[in-house]
Each structure stands twice: as C-alpha cells, then as structure tokens.
Image: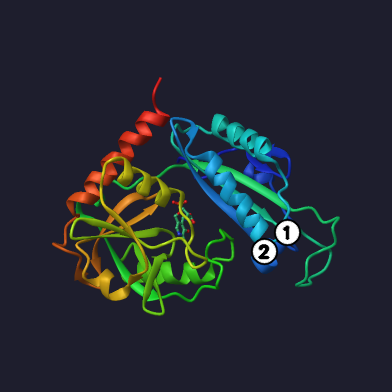
Amino acid sequence: MTPYVADPVYLNGRFLPLAEAGISPLDRGFLYGDGVYEVIPVYSRQAFRLDQHLARLQATLDGVRLGNPLDVDGWQAVVGELVASAPWDDQSIYLQVTRGADDKRDHAFPPAGVRPTAFAFASPLVTTPAAVRATGVAAITVPDLRWARCDLKVISLLANVLARQQAVDQGCAEAILIRDGVMKEGAASNIFLVSDGILLAPPKSRLMLPGITYDVVLELADAHGLPVKIGEIAETELRRADEVWMTSSTKEILAITTLDGQPVGTGSPGPLAGQMWQWYQDFKNNVMRKG
Ligand code: PDD
C-alpha cells in the first residue's frame, strides 16, 4: 500500500523515518494547539508558490509571537530534500512549528531556552477525480465559531474540524462559515461566487485565511479579463449565486453545486468554474511543468 507520509520526515534539524520521529507529550502543540502550519502543493517536484507560502508562515509566526526556527533558505532546503526523497511527482508538503516543550504546563510562553518544534513531511497530492469535478460537491452552511484571527494559519483548528465533520456527517464536502450574516470562507478553503457573470470574492480580513489559491484565482481572473468584485458577501447573496466555488492548495478550484440541500444555480458546475479550473491547470503547466 502507498504510504500517506513519505520517509524521511523532517524534525528539528534532522531527516529521519516517521517511525523514529518523536516529540515530548509536553509539546505545546499537543497541550495547547500552540503552533502554526502550512500546506504547499508540489507539481512535477516543484513547490508551487513556495515564497508566498513561506511568507504566510512568517506572517503567522509573527502574529502569534513565535520565532521562526529556520530562515527562508533553510525552509527551501527542507522542502527540497523532502520533495526529492518522496516517491511521487505531485505532492503535498506539510510544515508545522510549535512553541516547543517546557518541563511544566503553563499557559504563558516558556523560557527563551525552549526551542520551537519544527516538523515537516511529504505526502501524495490527492486531487479531485474528474467524475467529482463533473458533478461538483455538496456543502452546508454553519455558524463561524472560530476566534478573531482567522487570517493566521494556526494548528488550533477545533472549530474548523467540527464544522468539516458536520458537513461530512451530512454527506457533504465542505462547511461554509457564516459570521453575523456574512460569508467568510470554508472550514478548509476559500469561497468564491459568480453572480451575473461577475466573480465575487470576500475581502482579506482578520476573519479569513488569505489563501494562496485565492490570490492565484484573482490573478487569473485579471489576466483573462473576467470581471471581479471584492467585497463582503451576505449569506443571502451566497444563496442566490449562479455559481459557488471552493478553492485551496489541495482542492484547487471545485464547484459547490448543492448548498444546504438546495441546488446552486442549475445544480451543475457552472461554465466559469470549468473555465477557471482550466486556466489554473494551464497556469500550473506553464510555470511548473515546462522543460
Ligand atoms: N487549508 N481557508 C482555510 C480555513 C484553510 O484551511 C485553507 C487551506 C484555505 C485555502 O488556502 P490555500 O489556498 O493557501 O491552500 C482557506 C489547507 C489546505 C489545510 O488546512 O489542509
């Protein structure tokens, strides 16, 4: 059976088999969810938008006052080594940094001598099968119960986990988070709408993760002359949209065709979802797979 995690993994400066990679149960990632992460897609053994992912990692570390255990060159080397060792051409690289393990449990930061824990591994990139893309996926709406810094990519994901599980329990692929009547994003994706031929995107704010895929979608819309409106999206607009898409590094662009049991638009993926997906593939092929 193909393993989900490739050997070796990276832990605190060393590359070693997953089975030998151990951390203390007093690690603050375990005790408090006190840490940050990134998920980076790799196509044809090239990390996609690595600089942007590492910049978002730094922004999140700054946001939670956690020192970066590696500089950009260091992370590039770790990612390069993982990508080269893994058996797949297309991969997903997971990076995590926690505030390390003290010898006691205390909410406040540990003494300066406690080193952050840095962990990273490669797994195969599992993209959406064509048959699922052809029908689109179902989603539900749920109240956004997260904290007030959703722009930080932190590992404390309990509200996201519960929202996604609520969707899965109802046979759905994603939960769309609604806060004060406003659509924010998915449990693990950004959300776009199409209404009357215009691409609607929620603005970046502290209540939404600034997706790397979100940026690529907006760049592609601009490059191809697709009209875009960036602004707060009311729940009512979501419900009457012609198209709803979820986007992320692993899902790419995926049409949501059922929302809370009701069809979105015609109930089939709309033309612009297919168009954007194709632009995204072409873009990837141009920047990643040439030569
Ligand atoms: N999640 N919003 C949330 C809450 C997310 O967790 C993600 C990604 C995104 C999309 O970001 P990007 O386009 O940079 O992948 C938006 C990753 C894939 C995860 O948690 O596994």
Q: Is residue 290 left or right of residue 79?
A: left
- Which residue is under mark 2? 34
Where residue 63 appears, as percent x and y from the top left, is 64, 60
* Residue 131 visible to an observer of this rendering: no
Residue drawn at x 43%, y 65% as measured from the top left: 187
In the foreground, 205 or 263: 205
Give the quarter of the image for residue 286.
Answer: top left
Q: Is residue 109 left or right of residue 76?
A: right
Where residue 4 appears, as percent x and y from the top left, is 49, 45
Q: Residue 166, relative to residue 152: is it above or below?
A: below
In which quadrant will I find the N terminus? top left
In which quadrant will I find the C terminus? top left
Residue 52: give its label.
Answer: none
Report if the CB atoms under discs 2 and 1 are less than 8 Å apart.
yes
Dot 2: element: loop
Q: Residue 53, relative to residue 268: is it above or below?
A: above
**Under 8 Å from ligand 1: the CB of mark 1?**
no
In the foreground, 27 or 235: 235
- Which residue is under mark 1? 99
Disc 2 marks which amino acid?
A: Asp
Scheme of colours in the image = rainbow
* Residue 272 visible to an observer of this rendering: yes
Q: Report the Cα–Cα distance between label 2 and label 1.
A: 6 Å
**Under 8 Å from ligand 1: the CB of mark 2?**
no
